[in-house]
């Protein structure tokens, strides 16, 4: 007997088509998010064929929003934000204001209300977390100063949008929309006699009450729950506790304090991020966060009418111009005004030249509050899809523009000179720092060392190897691309080459032809394999030592020419066996004992 299962049909169609089109997008080096949106268009009511249940899709999307915001809170780093607050906070605020004004201007030309223009402009002002972080990771810029500024800028944008999500329902009536009556934001509905400042005041008071409860009670209760469940040793219960906290806090915040589900989820993640188990919590919740985030993008795609590309051609081009040109120019001018290098300004401009998750959430909220016309939502969706598609091209354009702009500015321009390098005293060290920031033209200078060791990476493994080499008075240099680690090595008097060792110029600067050994302390076997091939081509006699995490990685690296490949799990097992057999040659010190972790 056939069963009517719209929920299953919606999930299967959504995830199945999202996988197909996400894989196709990835194949053509386009962010998979575009594929998810296309999948939504195909199962939506605006295209022929199967039509998913829009109501169910919206509810699944609501869970996706909760988990998406929970993930943002889980990765929120106040420390990183404070380190770049001087540029990220004012820069993001000014850029949001400029983009919002451009959006209001376009809305006025289209005959919309001021409230519609504000929602539209805000939606165009915030970049996609997913797209920006992926772009930085692909270019290995997360740990650089430019990367930290971009991430800090993004955090400020996210916080501004969270505030907008809280205030918009309360201000809907004042802005010419319709206050919510039947949803989770209903507790924010206030009489018109309160006036705009009364509405804002009561809303902020409720948000403040929620924040106080989370900081006073949540900071104690949430970490305690995580640690209690972790000590049960059940991975299943731990995963369930993370999801229950995320969904429970979001729902409770909406019901008890009248704030948005998004804000509740964000604070749940932020409080959880202070726990020692936050990384484990992020890892365990990631699969479900990814799955429901995909359904969120699919549900957004269902709302998009592809025929609007024809009927709204000029408004879509104007929207795209605000996102790609207006926002980018604003960010570039702001960063230059703060006397940062041209390379930093260009990279941040390219990073922010797109919109994504928050834009969709704001668009849906605006339509639901009768503030934003459906045409506005279509323009936002079209602008998001097109700007995400064009984002890789933006990075190519800024890479092409960088030498030309620097030549026009002059090598001794005040913008470049005014940025202190730090306490470096040697020319080679200054070059290392400049190369790490991307401000150095041409290849880094070649080291004068010979008969030395080249150590790739200075993380947990590399730092221990480096300390041993230093204690044994063996000459070595480090190839590293993280600013913080480069500064530490510089202070310790260790010679460095800044950048990615897979880059020919960077690796050549370490003089592999005259080196005695190459030590690969990085965990990425694919990248390590490229470096092994480069080293063997430069010096067939060099001794190559690498690390691996699986038998397949061991075989891969040995097949490419590594002399010794050490797999961490095997060494742990060997150490345990030696202790059990009473043959351990090195005593286990309490300072390096590994604390038991939850199963």
Image: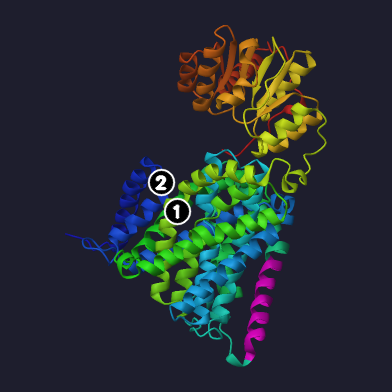
Toward the viewer: 181 or 39?
39
Residue 218 picture location, percent across and down: 67, 61
Residue found 62% across the figure and 28% down from its top: 443
Q: Considering the numbered disc 1 on the image, is that residue within a helix, a strand or a loop?
A: helix
Residue found 44% across the figure and 59% down from its top: 384
Toward the viewer: 17 or 225?
17
- Magenta-highlighted residues: 194-213
Callout 2 crowding tier (Cα within 10 Å): few <14, some 14–19, many ≥20: some
Toward the viewer: 279 or 191?
191
Coloration of the structure image: rainbow
Left-right relation of 29 to 323 = left
Residue 548 picture location, percent across and down: 54, 23
Q: CA distance from mark 2 to mark 1?
A: 8 Å
Instruction: Locate residue 424: give its quadrant.
Output: top right
Q: Which mark is residue 30?
A: 2
Mark 2 vs 1: CB contact within 8 A: yes
| 310 in the magenta segment | no
Query: Circle 1 sits on which residue?
Result: 388
Q: Residue furthest left?
A: 1
Callout 1 crowding tier (Cα within 10 Å): few <14, some 14–19, many ≥20: many
């Amino acid at each position: 007997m056939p069963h009517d299962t719209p929920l299953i049909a919606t999930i299967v169609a959504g995830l199945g088509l999202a996988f197909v089109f996400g894989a196709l997008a990835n194949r053509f080096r386009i962010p998979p998010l575009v594929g998810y949106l296309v999948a939504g268009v195909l199962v939506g009511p605006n295209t022929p064929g199967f039509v998913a249940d829009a109501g169910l899709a919206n509810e699944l999307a609501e869970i996706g929003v909760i988990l998406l915001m929970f993930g943002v809170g889980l990765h929120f780093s106040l420390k990183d934000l404070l380190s770049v607050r001087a540029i990220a906070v004012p820069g993001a605020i000014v850029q949001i204001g400029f983009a919002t004004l451009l959006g209001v201007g376009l809305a006025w030309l289209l005959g919309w209300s001021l409230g519609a223009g504000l929602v539209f402009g805000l939606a165009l002002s915030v970049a996609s977390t997913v797209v920006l972080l992926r772009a930085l990771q692909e270019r290995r810029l997360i740990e650089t100063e430019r990367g930290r500024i971009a991430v800090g800028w993004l955090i400020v944008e996210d916080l501004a949008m969270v505030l907008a999500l809280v205030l918009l329902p309360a201000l809907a009536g004042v802005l010419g929309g319709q206050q919510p009556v039947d949803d989770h934001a209903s507790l924010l509905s206030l009489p018109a006699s309160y006036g705009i400042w009364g509405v804002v005041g009561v809303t902020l008071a409720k948000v403040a009450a929620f924040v106080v409860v989370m900081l006073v009670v949540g900071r104690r209760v949430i970490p305690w729950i995580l640690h209690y469940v972790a000590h049960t040793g059940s991975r299943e219960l731990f995963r369930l506790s993370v999801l229950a906290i995320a969904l429970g806090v979001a729902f409770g915040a909406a019901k008890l304090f009248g704030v948005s589900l998004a804000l509740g989820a964000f604070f749940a993640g932020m409080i959880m991020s202070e726990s020692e188990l936050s990384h484990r919590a992020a890892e365990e919740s990631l699969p479900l966060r990814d799955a429901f985030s995909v359904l969120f993008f699919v549900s957004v795609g269902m709302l998009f009418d592809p025929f609007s590309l024809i009927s709204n051609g000029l408004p879509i081009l104007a929207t795209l111009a605000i996102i790609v040109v207006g926002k980018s120019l604003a960010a570039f001018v702001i960063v230059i005004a703060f006397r940062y290098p041209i390379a930093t300004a260009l990279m941040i401009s390219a990073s922010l030249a797109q919109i994504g998750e928050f834009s969709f959430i704001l668009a849906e909220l605006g339509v639901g509050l009768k503030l934003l016309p459906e045409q506005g939502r279509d323009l936002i969706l079209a602008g998001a899809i097109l700007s995400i598609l064009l984002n890789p091209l933006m990075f190519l354009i800024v890479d092409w523009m960088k030498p030309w702009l620097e030549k026009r500015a002059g090598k001794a321009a005040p913008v470049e000179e005014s940025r202190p390098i730090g306490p470096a005293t040697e020319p080679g060290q200054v070059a290392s720092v400049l190369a790490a920031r991307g401000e150095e033209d041409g290849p880094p200078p070649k080291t004068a060392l010979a008969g030395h060791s080249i150590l790739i990476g200075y993380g947990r493994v590399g730092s221990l190897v480096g300390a041993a080499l230093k204690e044994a008075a063996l000459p070595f240099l480090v190839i590293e691309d993280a600013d913080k680690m480069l500064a530490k090595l510089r202070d310790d008097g260790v010679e460095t080459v800044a950048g990615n060792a897979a880059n020919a110029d960077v690796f050549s600067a370490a003089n592999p032809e005259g080196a005695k050994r190459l030590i690969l302390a990085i965990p990425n076997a694919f990248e390590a394999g490229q470096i092994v091939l480069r080293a063997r081509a430069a010096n067939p006699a060099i001794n190559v030592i690498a690390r691996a995490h699986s038998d397949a990685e061991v075989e891969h690296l040995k097949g490419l020419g590594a002399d010794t490949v050490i797999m961490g799990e095997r060494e742990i097992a060997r150490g345990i066996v030696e202790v059990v057999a009473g043959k351990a040659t090195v005593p286990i010190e309490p300072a390096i004992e590994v604390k038991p972790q939850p199963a």
